[in-house]
C-alpha cells in the first residue's frame, strides 16, 4: 500500500470549508461553460500580414537590463547608429499587402486604343454607298460591333498589366561596332636616297581578327596587368637612370667603345665626387659605383645580362678603393643585437646606424668581388690583389680584416717568388710595424702557422722572414742585462727573517663610497675606450700568445726529420727572439741544433764528393754550409741572453766552425746570396761592431760570408764568450782564416784581414806570429787537425800576410796586409 502511494502527488491542503469549496467549484464550471460558448461566436483574429500597418513594439515602458559592456559600446559607437532615428516609421510599419496595394495605385496606366468606324481623314471617297444607311445592316453591324467592343474592352482591361510599353519594345542600343578592317598596311621601305616607299596592304587573316577581338573584349584585364607590371619597372638607384645620369645598361650598350669608356669615366668621376661630398647620404651611389665593377649587369627592365668592359671594371674597382680609404670610419662596425634593434632611438642615431650597416654591406660586396677575381686569376687579378693589400695596410682596424689576411697569406703559399709575393710580403710587414695592440699580428701569425702545417713546409723561406718584423722584441722588453736574467726591478729594503712582512692596510669604505668607487671605475674604463688607449696588460697577453704560436712553428720546423728550406728562416727567427725563449727549452734546443749540424755535415760531405761532377751539387754544398753556420750562430745567440745563467759548453760548435773554414776556402759562391734571409735585406758586419744586436744576422746578412763573420764575432767579441777566449783559440782561427783568404775573393779577404787585425789587437801574444824570424818551437803545426786546441798554432807564423802583401792582384788587399805586418801595440 505504501509502495503504491510513493509515486502519487499529494493533494494541496485546503484552508476553506467544504461548503465554500462546493460553491466555488460550481461557479468555475459555469464560467468555463460560458467562455466556451463565447469562443464559438467570436470572429477569428486578423493576421498581421493582412493588416495595413504592423505596429512597431515600443519598449519605453518595459524595463530592459543593459550591461556595462553594452553601455560602453553605445558610448563609443553611438554616433554611428544615429541614422536609426531618421528612419520612416510609417514606411517600416507597412505590411506586404499594403505595399502591393500602393504599388497598384502608383502603377502607370496604359491607355487603350479607341476603334471607330469613321473613315480616315485622308479618304476622299464620295461614293453613294458609303453614305447610305441600311437599318438591317446597321443593326447587324451594331450588334457585331457591340460584341467586338465588349471583347475588345475585356481584352484591354485584362491585358493592361502585361502589355509592353513603347520603351520596352525598343531594341537595346548596342555598341556600334567599327567596321573591322579587312586589310593591313604593310611596313614602308626606306630607299637609298632617303625616300620612304609604301609597299601597299595585305589581307588580314582570321587569326589576327580573333586576336583583335580578344584584345577588345579584355581591356580591363590588360589595364590591370599593366598596373601590376608598372611597379616592377621602377628603375633602381644602382642601375637605373637616376640623379640626371643615364642608366648603367645604356652606358654599357653604347656601340662605340671609346664613347662607352668616356661616358663611364664621366659618370664614375661624378659619382665619386658626390659620395665624398656627403658620404652618409650616398649609399645608393656606392651601390651604383659597385655596379660598374661587375662582370655582367642585369636590371629589372633588362633581365638579360649585359657584359661589362674590362677597362670600365678596372676604373670602378680602383675608384672604390680610393672611396673606401676616405669614408671608412676609424672604428669597427659591429652587427646590432635584437635588443638594440627593438629600442627606440633618435632620428640621428637611426640614420647613422642605417648608414653604417649599409656601408658594411657594400664593402662586403666589394671584397667578395676582389676575392672572386683573385681566385679566378682573370684580367683583374693583379689589381684585386693590390686593392686587398692596400685595404689591409690602410684600414686594418675595420671589418673583414681576417678575410683580407687569409687571401694574402694564401697568395704566399707557393714555392715560387714573384712581384705579387713581394707585394704581399711588404703588406704584412707594414701591418706588423703599425700594429699597436698586437691583435692583427696575432691573426697573421695564426694564419701563417696553419698554412705552413697544411702545406707540409713546402713554401718559400721568405714567408717566414716577414715574422722577423714582429714588434715582440720592443714591446715585451729589451734583452736582459748581463747580470740579471729578467728585467731589473726596484729593490725593496729587506727585513729580518724573524719579522713578518706587514700586509698593506685596507682602507675601510662605506657602502656609498664603494658604490661611487665602482661607478668611477666604469667611467674610467669608458674613457679609456673612447681615448683609444692601448691596455698594457691586454697587449702583453696578446703578444705572449703570439710568441707561443711563433716558437711552436719554429720548433716544429727544427724537429722535422728531414731538413726543409724553411730551416734557415726558423733559425733566424729563433736567434732574433732568443731573449724571449723560455730558459727551460735551452738544453733541448742545444741538442736539436747539434743533431742538425751533424745531419748537415753528412750532407755537405756527400755534396763535396760530387762537387766536380755537377754544378747543382755546388749550390747544395753551399746551402748545407750556410745552414750549419746558422745553427752555430743560433746556439751562441741563445746563450748570450737569458742563457748566460746556464753553464753550458759550446766547444763542439766552436770545433765545427773551425773545421768548416778549409772547405769554405774552395767555395766559389761564398759571396753569393743565400736563402737564409730575404734578398731585400742587405748589410755587412765586422769585428769593429762587437756589440751588434742579434737582428744583424737576420735583418742584414744575406751571404755565407756575413753569417761566418757573425759567428766569429759572437765567439771572440761578445760579452759572454769574448772575454773567456784563450790565446791558442785566437791564434788557430787567425792562422786558418789567413790560409783561406789566399783563395777567397777580395771582399772576403779584406774582411778576414780586418778580423785577424782585431784578434792581434785584442791578444798581444799573437804579435809573435807576425814575425818570420827563426825561433825555437815546442812542436809542429798541424793544419790538418780540425781541433784548434791540438793544432799547435803558435808553432807557426802568419806568413800568408807576406804573400798577400806582395803577390795579391787587388791593391786594397795588399795595403791591408802591409798594415797588419807593420802592426805594433
Image (cartoon, rainbow, N blue to C red):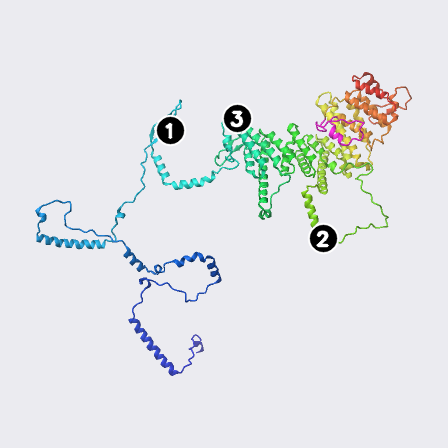
* Residue at image mark 3: 258
Q: Considering the whole magenta stretch, tell me its main secondary structure.
A: loop
Give the residue number, with chain letter if any, for mark 1: 187
Q: Is residue 611 magenta?
A: no
Query: What range of the chain is rendered magenta?
Result: 674-703
Asked if residue 682 can be seen in this view, the reply is: yes
Q: Residue at x 35, y 37 (%)?
A: 210
Q: Vertically, is 648 above or below 809?
A: below
Q: Is residue 102 left or right of residue 757?
A: left
Which is nearer the N-term, disc 3 or disc 1?
Answer: 1
Q: Position of residue 95 (x, y in %)?
A: 33, 60
Q: Quadrant of residue 629?
A: top right
Asked whether residue 789 appears in the rendered view, the answer is: no
Closer to the camera in the image, 811 or 660: 811
- Residue 699 position (above or below residue 504): above
CA–CA distance in space, label 3 to label 1: 35 Å
- Look at the image and say whether residue 688 sits in the magenta stretch: yes
Q: Residue at x 31, y 65 (%)?
A: 46
59 horizontally vs 443: left or right: left
The residue carrying mark 2 is 514
Give the mark, 2 or 3, whose residue is nearer the N terminus: 3
Q: Position of residue 566 (x, y in %)?
A: 70, 31
**Circle nearer the viewer, 1 or 2:** 2
Amino acid at each position: 500500500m505504501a509502495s503504491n502511494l510513493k509515486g502519487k502527488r499529494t493533494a494541496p491542503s485546503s484552508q476553506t470549508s467544504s461548503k465554500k469549496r462546493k460553491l466555488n467549484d460550481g461557479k468555475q464550471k459555469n464560467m468555463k461553460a460560458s467562455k466556451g460558448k463565447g469562443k464559438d461566436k467570436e470572429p477569428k483574429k486578423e493576421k498581421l500580414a493582412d493588416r495595413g500597418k504592423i505596429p512597431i513594439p515600443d519598449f519605453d515602458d518595459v524595463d530592459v537590463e543593459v550591461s556595462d559592456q553594452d553601455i560602453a559600446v553605445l558610448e563609443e559607437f553611438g554616433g554611428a547608429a544615429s541614422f536609426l532615428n531618421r528612419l520612416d516609421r510609417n514606411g517600416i510599419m507597412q505590411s506586404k499587402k499594403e505595399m502591393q496595394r500602393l504599388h497598384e495605385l502608383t502603377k502607370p496606366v496604359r491607355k487603350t486604343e479607341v476603334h471607330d468606324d469613321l473613315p480616315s481623314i485622308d479618304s476622299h471617297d464620295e461614293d453613294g454607298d458609303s453614305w447610305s444607311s441600311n437599318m438591317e445592316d446597321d443593326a447587324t453591324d451594331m450588334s457585331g460591333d457591340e460584341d467586338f467592343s465588349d471583347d475588345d474592352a475585356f481584352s484591354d482591361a485584362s491585358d493592361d498589366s502585361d502589355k509592353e510599353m513603347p520603351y520596352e519594345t525598343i531594341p537595346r542600343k548596342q555598341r556600334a561596332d567599327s567596321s573591322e578592317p579587312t586589310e593591313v598596311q604593310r611596313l614602308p621601305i626606306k630607299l637609298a636616297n632617303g625616300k620612304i616607299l609604301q609597299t601597299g596592304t595585305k589581307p588580314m587573316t582570321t587569326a589576327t581578327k580573333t586576336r583583335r577581338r580578344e584584345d577588345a573584349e579584355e581591356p580591363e584585364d590588360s589595364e590591370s596587368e599593366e598596373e601590376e607590371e608598372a611597379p616592377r619597372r621602377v628603375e633602381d638607384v644602382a642601375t637605373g637612370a637616376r640623379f640626371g645620369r643615364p642608366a648603367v645598361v645604356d652606358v654599357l650598350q653604347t656601340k662605340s667603345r671609346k664613347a662607352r669608356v668616356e661616358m663611364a669615366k664621366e659618370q664614375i668621376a661624378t659619382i665619386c665626387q658626390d659620395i665624398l661630398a656627403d658620404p652618409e647620404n650616398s649609399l645608393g651611389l656606392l651601390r651604383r659605383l659597385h655596379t660598374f665593377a661587375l662582370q655582367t649587369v642585369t636590371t629589372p627592365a633588362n633581365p638579360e645580362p649585359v657584359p661589362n668592359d674590362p677597362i670600365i671594371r678596372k676604373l670602378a674597382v680602383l675608384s672604390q678603393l680610393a672611396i673606401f680609404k676616405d669614408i671608412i670610419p676609424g672604428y669597427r662596425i659591429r652587427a646590432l643585437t635584437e635588443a638594440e634593434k627593438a629600442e627606440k632611438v633618435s632620428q640621428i642615431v637611426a640614420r647613422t646606424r642605417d648608414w653604417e650597416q649599409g656601408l658594411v654591406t657594400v664593402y662586403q660586396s666589394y671584397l667578395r668581388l676582389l676575392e672572386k677575381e683573385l681566385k679566378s686569376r682573370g684580367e683583374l687579378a693583379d689589381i684585386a690583389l693590390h686593392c686587398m693589400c692596400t685595404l689591409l695596410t690602410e684600414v686594418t682596424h675595420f671589418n673583414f680584416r681576417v678575410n683580407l689576411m687569409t687571401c694574402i697569406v694564401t697568395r704566399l703559399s707557393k714555392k715560387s717568388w714573384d712581384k705579387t709575393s713581394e707585394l704581399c710580403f711588404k703588406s704584412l710587414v707594414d701591418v706588423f710595424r703599425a700594429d699597436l695592440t698586437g691583435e692583427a699580428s696575432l691573426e697573421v701569425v695564426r694564419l701563417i702557422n696553419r698554412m705552413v702545417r697544411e702545406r707540409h713546409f713546402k713554401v718559400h723561406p721568405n714567408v717566414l722572414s716577414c715574422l722577423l718584423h714582429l714588434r715582440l722584441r720592443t714591446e715585451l722588453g729589451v734583452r736582459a742585462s748581463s747580470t740579471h736574467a729578467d728585467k731589473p726591478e726596484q729593490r725593496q729594503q729587506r727585513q729580518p727573517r724573524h719579522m713578518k712582512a706587514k700586509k698593506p692596510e685596507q682602507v675601510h669604505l662605506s657602502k656609498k663610497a664603494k658604490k661611487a668607487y665602482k661607478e668611477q671605475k666604469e667611467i674610467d674604463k669608458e674613457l679609456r675606450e673612447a681615448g683609444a688607449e692601448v691596455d698594457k696588460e691586454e697587449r702583453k697577453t696578446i703578444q705572449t700568445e703570439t710568441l707561443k704560436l711563433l716558437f711552436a712553428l719554429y720548433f716544429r720546423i727544427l724537429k722535422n726529420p728531414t731538413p726543409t728550406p724553411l730551416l734557415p728562416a726558423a733559425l733566424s727567427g729563433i736567434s732574433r727572439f732568443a731573449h724571449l725563449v723560455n730558459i727551460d727549452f735551452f738544453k733541448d734546443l742545444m741538442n736539436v741544433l747539434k743533431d742538425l749540424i751533424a745531419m748537415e755535415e753528412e750532407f755537405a760531405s756527400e755534396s763535396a764528393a760530387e762537387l766536380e761532377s755537377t754544378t747543382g751539387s755546388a749550390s747544395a754544398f753551399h746551402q748545407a754550409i750556410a745552414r750549419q753556420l746558422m745553427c752555430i750562430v743560433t746556439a751562441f745567440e741563445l746563450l748570450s741572453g737569458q742563457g748566460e745563467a746556464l753553464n753550458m759548453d759550446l766547444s763542439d760548435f766552436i770545433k765545427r766552425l773551425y773545421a768548416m773554414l778549409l772547405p769554405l776556402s774552395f767555395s766559389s759562391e761564398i759571396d753569393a746570396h743565400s736563402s737564409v734571409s730575404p734578398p731585400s735585406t742587405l748589410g755587412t758586419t765586422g769585428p769593429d761592431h762587437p756589440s751588434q744586436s742579434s737582428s744583424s744576422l737576420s735583418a742584414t746578412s744575406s751571404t755565407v760570408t756575413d753569417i761566418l763573420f757573425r759567428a766569429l764575432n759572437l765567439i771572440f767579441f761578445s760579452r759572454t764568450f769574448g772575454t773567456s777566449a784563450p790565446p791558442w783559440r785566437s791564434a788557430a782561427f787567425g792562422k786558418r782564416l789567413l790560409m783561406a783568404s789566399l783563395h777567397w775573393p777580395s771582399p772576403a779577404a779584406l774582411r778576414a784581414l780586418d778580423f785577424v787585425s782585431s784578434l792581434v789587437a785584442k791578444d798581444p801574444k799573437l804579435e809573435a806570429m807576425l814575425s818570420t824570424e827563426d825561433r825555437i818551437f815546442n812542436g809542429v803545426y798541424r793544419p790538418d787537425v780540425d781541433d784548434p786546441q791540438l793544432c799547435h798554432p803558435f808553432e807557426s807564423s802568419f806568413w800568408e800576410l807576406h804573400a798577400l802583401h806582395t803577390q795579391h792582384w787587388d791593391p786594397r788587399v795588399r795595403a791591408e796586409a802591409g798594415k797588419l805586418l807593420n802592426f805594433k801595440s
